[in-house]
Image (spheres, helix red, strand yellow):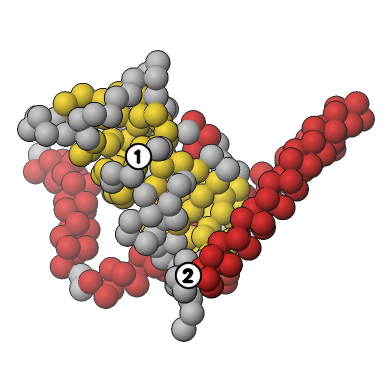
Amino acid sequence: MHFKRFDQARPFLTLGVVIVAWLVLPVAIKSFMRVTFFELQAPITVSASYVRSLQDFWSLRNQSKKELIEAGRDLARINASYSLAAQENQQLREGITRLEDLLRVPAQTEHRFEHARVARRDFSAWWQRLTIRKGRNYNIPVGAPVVFSGGVVGRVTAVHAYTATVELISSPSIRLAAVVEGDDRPMSYQGGINPTFGPARGVIEFVPIDIFASATAPKRLVTSGLGGVFPPGLTLGRVVKLEPSTDGLFKTGEIELDPLLSELIEVTVLVPLTTD
């Protein structure tokens, strides 16, 4: 009878021993084991990502000529509009440079754009992150902002040999200064507690009393540039709900994030250009 009870309790005892052993291990050994685990797992993640890309390639090869012609025509129109926008952007940059030289203002921090393919997505009650197919091999630094065409994706929280982990702005661990478009008063943005299959949301705090927004009349929330991580003016989401906070001095609200955050295929890492 005693042996039977022992056999039933053996899995729990084993689990308890493993937990205690992990707790008493030195921090250096834990860090080494964690890094080793990610480095061993990276080839599997990256290989699966390349296989998916190959599947997408062959699925496109099966498209009819008519569909390819229509897609090419649409792509040509988009390229034309992007070409015009690039020319306008270059003119604006040259104008800013002339003004900086004339007023003797220090140049703003520039970034190198490093485009990266998304290899893995982790969305759950605990994780809101992406794994990209570039790491130390492309000099990706920890803390670098990550963006896409719709605005901010998040920031790099861990860098490995060939991959990097990006914490999404929907994660509660992300907090940054933001402003409502057209207003220069900073507020505090933080990722929310998001369901696995639900739309991504964020929270805004310390909103001035005279700012109003609702689901029918949302306001665009952008980065303020404070803190020196994210450049100013990048889209975070839409303010769809505001209500007075408990102290009555400010408002708190709900931010609707871009639904494409859960479907991203490629992102851009803004790698700071050091002047050292």
Q: CA distance from mark 1 to mark 2?
A: 25 Å
Q: Does residue 168 sit above or below 29 in this rendering? A: above
**Marker disc for residue 103:** 2
Q: Please tell me how crowded label 2 is: few (under 14), some (14-19), or many (20+) other residues with Cα within 10 Å.
A: few
**273 or 260, which lies in front?**
273
Residue 93 in percent (x, y) is at 60, 60
**210 or 229, which lies in front?**
210
Tell me the residue at 55%/46% (across/down): 148
Residue 260 in percent (x, y) is at 53, 34
In the image as oriented, which residue stretches furthest toward the front?
A: 102
The residue pinned by badge 1 equals 183
**49 or 170, which lies in front?**
170
**Marker disc for residue 54:** none
Tell me the residue at 34%/20% (across/down): 214
Q: Secondary structure at mark 2?
A: helix
In the image as oriented, which residue stretches furthest toward the top?
A: 216
The image quarter in which residue 227 lies: bottom left
**Whether residue 61 is visible:** yes
Give the position of the N terminus as an image quadrant.
Answer: top left
Tell me the residue at 79%/42% (across/down): 80
Residue 226 in percent (x, y) is at 33, 56
Left or right side of 182 for 67: right
Tell me the residue at 39%/60% (across/down): 229
* Residue type at the position of mark 2: Leu
Q: Please tell me how crowded label 1 is: few (under 14), some (14-19), or many (20+) other residues with Cα within 10 Å.
A: few
Q: Does residue 210 sit above or below 108 in this rendering? A: above
* Residue type at the position of mark 1: Asp
